[in-house]
Image (spheres, rainbow, N blue to C red):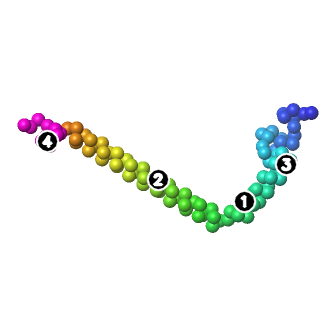
Amino acid sequence: MAGPALDVRGTVFGALTLWTVPQGTHARNLVVLVALIAGCVINGDTVTGVLRQATWLIVAVIVLVIVRTVEGVALKRSAQDRAGRPRDGAPVGEC
């Protein structure tokens, strides 16, 4: 029984490669079957649609982050304005 360093089945042009799922006997058939089904189902239009939806998702997240940031700044300024004035509305330092 040869050790992993002496196993020539996992070599590519003499360089050792790591053991991966497709190098197994039963797993190779499963990976090939899944890749074949994915290749038939996923075409150029599908990939374009997915990328388009991902782009709109990123744009929506950026807009939401900007809205939340502006809201936070507005609330902070509002709280500072309230903290600097007495309850009757007169400016600080005036009688």
Q: Of tags 3 and 4, which is closer to the observer?
A: 4
Alpha-carbon span between mark 4 and mark 1:
70 Å
N-terminal-most mark, 1 or 2: 1
Whether residue 42 sits left or right of residue 21 in the image: it is: left
- The range drawn in magenta is 85-95
Image position, residue 55 (x, y; %): 52, 58
Q: Which residue lies furthest to the front in this view?
A: 87
Element on which disc 4 rests: loop
Residue of label 2: 61
Classify 22 as above or below 43: above
Residue of label 4: 88
Residue shown at 79%/57% (left/top)?
33
Image position, residue 10 (x, y; %): 83, 42
Label 4 environment density (alpha carbons within 10 Å; few <14, some 14–19, many ≥20): few
N-terminal-most mark, 2 or 3: 3
Residue of label 1: 38
Alpha-carbon span between mark 1 and mark 2:
29 Å
Residue of label 3: 26
Amino acid type at mark 4: Asp
Amino acid type at mark 2: Val
Classify 47 as above or below 95: below
N-terminal-most mark, 4 or 1: 1
Element on which disc 3 rests: helix
Q: Which residue lies furthest to the right in this view?
A: 1
Element on which disc 2 rests: helix
Q: Residue furthest left?
A: 95
